[in-house]
Image: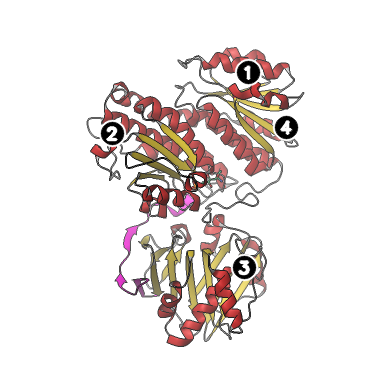
Amino acid sequence: MEGLGRLEYRGYDSAGVALVDDDRVATAKRAGKLTNLREALAENPPADSATAIGHTRWATHGGPTNANAHPHRGGTEGKLALVHNGIIENFHSLRQSLLADGVEFTSETDTEVVAHLVASAYADSGDLTRAMQDVVGTLEGAFTLLAVHADAPNTVVAARRNSPLVVGLGDGENFMGSDVAAFIGHTRKALELGQDQIVTITPDSCDVINFDGTPSEGKAYDVTWDAAAAEKDGYDTFMEKEIHDQPHAVRDTLLGRTDENGQLVLDEMSITEQDLRGISKIVIVACGTAAYAGMVAKYAIERWTRIPVEVELAHEFRYRDPVIDENTLVVSISQSGETADTLMAVRHAKELGARTLSICNTHGSTIPRESDAVLYTHAGPEIAVASTKAFVAQITASYILGLYLAQLRGGSFGRNAAEVLEELHGIPAKMSDLLGNLARVKEIAYFMADTRSVLFLGRHVGFPIAMEGALKLKELAYIHAEGFAAGELKHGPIALIEPGQPVFIVVPSPSAENGLHGKVVSNIQEIRARGARTLVIAEEGDDDVVPFADEVIRIPATSQLLAPLLTVVPLQYFSLQLSSAKGLDVDQPRNLAKSVTVE
Ligand code: M6R
């Protein structure tokens, strides 16, 4: 239950456990959050058991009900129990043939089909590993499966294809989980599995084979994340803790990137320098907040390298016919490294011959493993569904990549990389100052608890920040919110402005060379004249905004390209506080999951 609690952020519409007890398997399942299962187990405590599997679910096939919750049983006596992440794409035809054989189903899930198939294979061979091996060959789609059987005590068998699974190696006890958070309270020794592998654990053994039955070993590693890092550190919510973790996320992501001469070195970069010099186009693929990090990165990478950069939502990229070749670098950005849409885009890019580089926060996850090169962000575990510290770490890592490419290709920005890096190293201190001055943002959020619609305006790198501010508000406070490019205002969106309409405006630094500051100040005047309530995010000392602002939220002075690392912070905090003011679940907003592992 402790392990399930740490994984609940991955899915939380129902939960269940199965415990092997003598020659039977006992299950308990409840719709809703884990607390419902806890209550059910407290009312009917199961017998002692040393072998168990559990699951927290995010529904794909069949609604979030007790019946559809995992584990699912298989076999006539229900002696097998199985849990599953992912989707079995050919489940319908498999279900039809099982129905024709007289099998009775108790749920609408694709998972129950697999439970019956594995139970039936076990009846033939009497070997749970063999049974799993027999069945995985018949399945299409993405899956992590875990099974226990009443007649195979002390044994859990798992299989993975395109879905995460890690093993925790203990002393006289072994674990499995979708990520290491499940077992870091018990062991720091982990085993990374490859694609299409089956693992069988008992208290004293861990055996890995490939789907074709050939033995394998997996890759052992030590988990460096601290168990305490997965806790809330005294904050009310993970999101608040993670917002306050952001200076560390930026600092740690910058760590160890330069050699003794101040030159950028990227250890995980396995694409040759020669190939990188030949790159003629960069395409960034990502979803949600990670895509906004990519949009910010485009401004910087193009400016520093003069390489054209396109940013595309991964799910759109995957299903059109993108123009890319071996001189294209496709950069995926993903906190989890498991987002199915992004993974499919990376695979598509590889099929088309592009080089692929993953910017990712989760070691050993699928996207970095399948990419030619990896640049890990070091934000630590992000538990809240709404992404915050991963976002600033993604921008930081993208900037490191841009500076590295600029350095490789020479030119003036290559020579200036050290200056930008120095300024990046100064960002965590500025962020800490900013985080200490957000009391007024909280007051504004509580004052706005009944607001129905909020608009966000930004320009240049402030434009993706405006969209990120709107996304945060939608997902956390369930309020209609939209982010616009401030220059687009007069082409339509200004019609939305009516008396009292709250509008956040991200104002560029007055020091910006491109003169955008004055243009955005004019935009503020235009909407104020039409009755908007203007909430202005502006640099310290920028007095030009004062006459037209109902509220001014100050950020420390910084250059235009680095400002997103600061301007996003009050917007994150505003959404967090508005969600709290409405009494909503900050860490697990409705209808969402932290890791979207289905397309
Ligand atoms: O794990 P990823 O970075 O690939 O996730 C991508 C999006 O699903 C994610 O950023 C999502 O938009 C967040 N909930 C936003 O806060």
Can residue 71 be seen at all in this image of the molecule?
no
- SS at mark 3 in the image: loop
The answer to which of marks 4 and 3 sits earlier in the sequence is: 3
Choose mark 4 or mark 1, whichever is in front.
Answer: 1
Look at the numbered disc 4 and give the secondary structure of its residue.
helix
Q: Which residue is mark 2?
A: 264
Is disc 4 in contact with disc 2, using a CB cutoff of under 8 Å? no
10 Å crowding of disc 4: few (<14), some (14-19), many (20+) = few
Front residue of this view, candidates 561 and 26 = 561
Who's the residue at 35% across and 42% down the image?
Answer: 325
Task: Choose between 365 and 445: the one closer to the eye.
Answer: 365
Q: Residue flagged by tag 3: what amino acid is it?
A: Ala
Q: Is residue 226 magenta?
A: yes
Q: Is mark 1 within 8 Å of ligand 1?
A: no
User: What amino acid type should be assigned to the residue bearing mark 1?
Assistant: Asn
Choose top left, top right, bottom left or bottom right for residue 179: bottom left
Secondary structure beneath dot 1 equals helix
- Viewed as shown, does residue 150 lie left or right of 424? right
> Between marks 3 and 2, how big is the CA–CA gap?
49 Å
Residue bearing mark 3:
69
Q: Sequence-wise, which precedes: disc 4 or disc 1?
A: 4
Residue marked by disc 4: 447
Q: Mark 1 vs mark 2: give the one in front.
A: 1
Q: Which mark is residue 523?
A: 1
Mark 1 or mark 2: which comes first in sequence? 2
Nearest to the eye among marks 4 and 2: give it: 2
The residue lying at 55 percent from left, 66 percent from top is 55
Q: Residues within 10 Å of mark 3 (few under 14, many from 20)?
A: many
* Label 4 – label 1 distance at C-alpha: 25 Å
For the residues labelled 1 and 3, the Cα–Cα distance comes to: 51 Å
- Give the magenta part as a residue range: 203-230
